[in-house]
Amino acid sequence: MSSLLCQYSATSADVDNVQRLNRALNQSKSELQSMAAKLHRLERQQAEGVALQSRKNYMSAFGDLGDRAEYIHLLEHEMEQERRVGRRDKQIVA
């Protein structure tokens, strides 16, 4: 009887240990997903910042563009739309 009680206790401890490890694994997966999302967001912000800085450099180098400034704004808007479509398509494929 004592042997059976020890086996039950060991099995119970094994089950508890597996459950604890599964919870830790799920928490780690969740943290990893969160960090990946933050990294993606930071990379996107950095890319947008570089594009904005390039535009500022261009504008300061060429000064007053008159009507061309509106054309540049239109092109930037179209490029942003293309990026959004590309991101959406990339998400659909993934």
Image: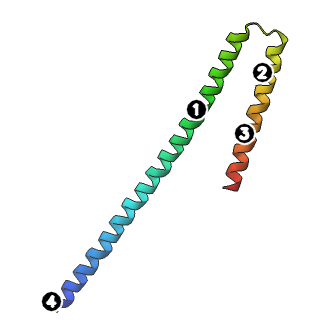
User: According to the image, label 4 marks what residue?
Assistant: 2
Residue located at (79% from left, 10% from top): 65
User: Can you give x and y, in whole percent of width and height, for residue 78 in the image?
Assistant: 79, 31
Secondary element at tag 3: helix
- Mark 1 and mark 3 lie on one chain; the one further toward the N terminus is 1
Residue located at (75% from left, 42% from top): 85
The residue type indicated by label 3 comes to Arg
Q: Distance between the residues labelled 4 and 3?
A: 67 Å
Labelled disc at residue 45: 1
- Is 92 on the left-hand or right-hand side of 53? right
- Of all residues, the one furthest to the front in this rendering is 61
User: Can you give x and y, in whole percent of width and height, for residue 6 in the image?
Assistant: 19, 84
Q: How far apart are marks 1 and 4 (CA)?
A: 64 Å
Q: Is residue 32 above or below residue 83?
A: below
Please state which of residues 8 and 52 is positioned toward the viewer in this rendering: 52
User: According to the image, label 2 marks what residue?
Assistant: 73
Task: Specify the quadrant of the image occupied by residue 87.
Answer: top right
Q: Distance between the residues labelled 3 and 2?
A: 17 Å
User: According to the image, label 3 marks what residue?
Assistant: 84
Q: Distance between the residues labelled 2 and 4?
A: 82 Å
